[in-house]
Image (tube, rainbow, N blue to C red):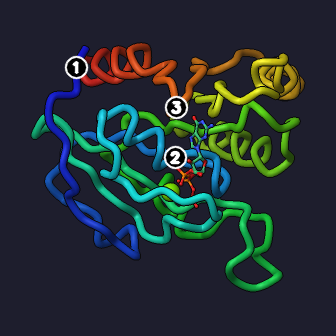
Amino acid sequence: AQIKTSSFASSHARVAQAPTDGRPEFAFIGRSNVGKSSLINMLASRKELAHTSGKPGKTQLINYFLINHSWYLTDLPGYGYAVQSKKTRGKWESRTEKYFLNRQTLVTAFVLIDSNVPPQLIDLEFVNWLGEHGVPFVLAFTKTDRKKSRDGGSVEAFKTELLKTWEELPPCFLTSATNEDGRDEIVDFMEASLLD
Ligand code: GTP
Ligand code: MG
């Protein structure tokens, strides 16, 4: 499994402006600062393909990265960080819903969950929302290099919460952008999904 080439393709404020070339895509979504852009860089083996920041709310547009000249990684703005009104505080944007309900070229969404913090209501709500709407998704637990994660973290706790609502768990990946954990597994998964 290999990502040989990667390049920035385009940025869009609105889903309606996203590429219309029909190429398949994998989307990265999760709470602000969870490590979406960092994971994209890790998968592509590029330091600054997607812009990252220690401050939440860095990615504000829908960013498309073209992989191997044939498919996209899509970096979405995070949820759960108040940039707009109090009313939308803690919830994801309607733009995010539009993306997942309408994007026909979406193969699978990667929902990123920080493996260092206890299960967060907004993550559980978002995963449940995807499940209720039949959006194909997997989970990627992030920052497994950090101490809290290494000390046991919250991966099992999050899975336990999900199993209160769902009979089965989606595929789950343990990832670290720092030490490249999970890279081969995810790229293999993507390539297999593209062949289906
Ligand atoms: P928004 O665009 O604001 O929604 O954030 P994002 O989810 O794209 O997060 P981003 O990739 O910008 O990373 C946020 C912070 O977490 C940065 O300081 C990263 O360096 C750090 N980070 C990301 N992945 C890892 C990881 O695997 N390990 C560690 N230790 N830090 C990470
Ligand atoms: Mg980002």
Whether 109 is drawn above or below 21: the answer is: above
Cβ at disc 3 under 8 Å from ligand 1: yes
Q: Secondary structure at mark 2?
A: helix
Mark 2: give few (<14), some (14-19) or many (20+) Cα within 10 Å. many
- Name the residue at 22% across, 27% down: 3
Cβ at disc 2 under 8 Å from ligand 1: yes
Q: Secondary structure at mark 3?
A: loop
- Residue 97 can be seen in this image: no
Place of residue 157 in the rendered image (x, y in percent of width and height, measured from the top left): 87, 23
Q: Quadrant of residue 114?
A: top right
The residue pinned by badge 3 equals 178
Labelled disc at residue 36: 2
Q: Is residue 166 left or right of residue 186?
A: right
Q: CA distance from mark 2 to mark 1?
A: 20 Å
Amino acid type shown at disc 3: Thr
Q: CA distance from mark 1 to mark 3?
A: 19 Å
- Name the residue at 78% across, 47% down: 125
